[in-house]
Image (tube, coloured by chain):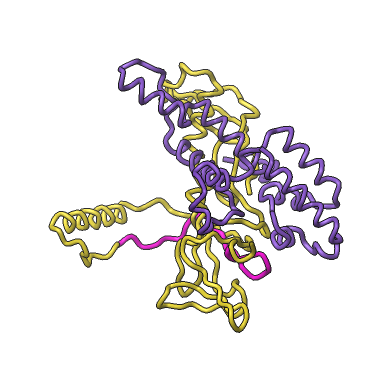
Chain colours: A yellow, B purple
Amino acid sequence: MFILSKISDLIRIPPDEFKRDTISAITHQLNRNYANKIVPRIGLCITIYDILEVDDGQLKPGDGSAYINVTFRAMIFKPFVGEILTGWITKCTADGIKVSMLGLFDDIFIPHKMMFEGCRFLPEDSAWVWPMDEETKLYFDVNEMIRFRVEQEVFVEVKPKSPKEKEAEEEAEMKRQQALLEGKEDSTIPETTVEKHPPYAILGSCQTDGMGLVSWWE
Amino acid sequence: MKVIEKRDAFLSDYEVFQFLTNLETSHGWDDETQALLQQNRRKKIKTKKPYNNVTLQRITRDTISYLRVNKSYIAQDEDEEMDEVTKNQNMSSPICKLQNDQFSELMRDLNRFELFKIEKLQIVNQLPSNMVHLYSIVEECDSRFNEDQINEIISIIERYSQSQ
């Protein structure tokens, strides 16, 4: 589930960090840059594991900071394809099941074509059901613990928000708060935040024995 | 940023858990230090502030709490009569109870079987308690091992996941 990746990067140490010793100043800067961020085409960086190499610092004209080339190892959440993971169901839609790993990682999706054969979606219960045989029907309910196999990783290059998007978001937030103040609890103002593609997502499958809700196989 | 080696090493959940709990204590983010800080604040005693890095603190806490949950234990109705202590024990993953020497012993025990590295990694991460779970981790388990061997693997895992 977790790996170590060797990465080198040029980091900037601002002058107010000079009072610290080199290693802790570097670790601090690296953690600010990497902790809880997606490293493109690798995975989700949890923290810096250790620092392997520190070059001499460089100065740039017009800036009091030190620029240092460092080589370090980062602890990264990157399940390999075929790995079995456990998560919790957060949402069932007609397309499939959304699974979350309790704050660690949320963007896991099990599309309907990667579920057991014969699985159906019940819109009235908003749950998926797997008719295992004639009599038993097994339900995929929200908040249940689910085991799945990692099938594919999806990386999307995410652009930073444009000023227009930011403005629109702020406006929507203002409107929502105003509606709340006026006491309209069930206000009809839709949440404008369009669901964007997450930079790193995992596609999972539930097709073999042992997969699906943990309680089925106990 | 330049990636020199994408996969320098694999880490087991146990190692990650140890590393992160150490990180949490050394930065003063664990519950004990936090409680002490609160106390001192109330009594207006000046104490050294813990390292301030909100994102790192949050992801460390979340990862630890994910690893701490026992993923093969299902709460049952009859459990409600149990006292809090046993309930908590059942809820927490065996990973946080293991010791370093126990972990290496478990590894040594598993080395006796012809398992691939990646399968061993998943076994020590998930500590499967039943056959179905083990079969899903180990590919073509039924042709590579006979029933006795499979039962032995399960009993080894059980011994370590239940030891205190």
- Horizontal arrangement in the rendering, residue A114 relative to residue B114 (left or right): left
Identify the residue at the far left of this view.
A182
The quarter of the rendered structure image containing the C terminus of chain B is: top right
Question: A114 above or below A148?
Answer: below
Question: B54 above or below A89?
Answer: above
Q: Which residues are magenta?
A: A192-213
Residue in front for this viewpoint, A125 or A95: A125
- Horizontal arrangement in the rendering, residue B19 relative to residue B56 (left or right): right
- Horizontal arrangement in the rendering, residue A138 relative to residue A184 (left or right): right
Residue A148 seen from this side: yes
Q: Position of residue A118 (x, y in %)?
A: 59, 80
Q: Position of residue B159 (x, y in %)?
A: 74, 45
| Residue B65 covered by magenta stretch | no
Residue drawn where x is 19% and y is 57% of the image: A175
Main secondary structure found in the magenta portion: loop
Q: Position of residue B124 (x, y in %)?
A: 71, 46
Residue A7 seen from this side: no
Residue A54, quarter of the rendered image: top right
Q: Position of residue B135 (x, y in %)?
A: 74, 62
Residue drawn where x is 36% and y is 23% of the image: B39
Residue drawn where x is 47% and y is 57% of the image: A198
The quarter of the rendered structure image containing the N terminus of chain B is: top right
Residue in front for this viewpoint, B69 or A60: B69
